Image (tube, grey):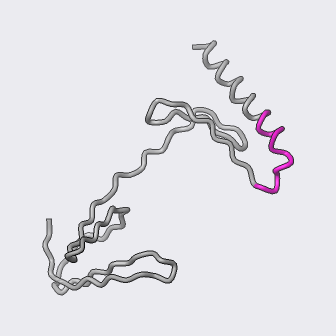
Amino acid sequence: MVTLNGEMTFGQLENGLHTADFMCCEDVQMEAYNAKCKVQVMRDGNVYMTELPKRIRNKAIFRDDNCTLSKGQDGRYYFVFSLDGKFLDEMPGRLMRQANAIARKIIKELIFK
């Protein structure tokens, strides 16, 4: 842990997002890094920052053109289908074809285990 003296400036952007900048007044050498953090600004001016844990992404079990089947950290299976809006008229057919293809892969996996 390093304790530094400096000035902190708080502001708000035109889009409503808040900003906070810290300017150190000491000559320090530190390793630079970027992180996603939870920031709490208290009424008395104290600021608390805690780095958020990295997101654990689900690994795909099966993939098709516009869909993925994965198992989440919670043990649930997720079927995700996405399609550009300009293909709306093709959506029912593509969804049925790709869902059936994933279902066939699951059946093969279960039979040959």
The residue that appears at 69% across and 29% down in the rendered structure is 102
The residue that appears at 24% across and 71% down in the rendered structure is 42
Q: How far across and how far down the image is residue 19, in percent?
A: 38, 78
Residue 69 relative to residue 98: left or right: left
- Number of callouts: 0
Residue closest to the far right:
89
* Residue 86 magenta-highlighted: yes
Q: Which residues are magenta?
A: 85-96
Q: How far across and how far down the image is residue 78, in percent?
A: 57, 35
The residue that appears at 40% across and 76% down in the rendered structure is 18
Of the 4 image quadrants, the one containing the C terminus is top right
* Residue 94 magenta-highlighted: yes
Residue closest to the far front:
43
Q: How far across and how far down the image is residue 56, in percent?
A: 43, 45
Relative to 28, say whether 113 is above or below: above
Within the image, what quadrant is residue 27 found in? bottom left
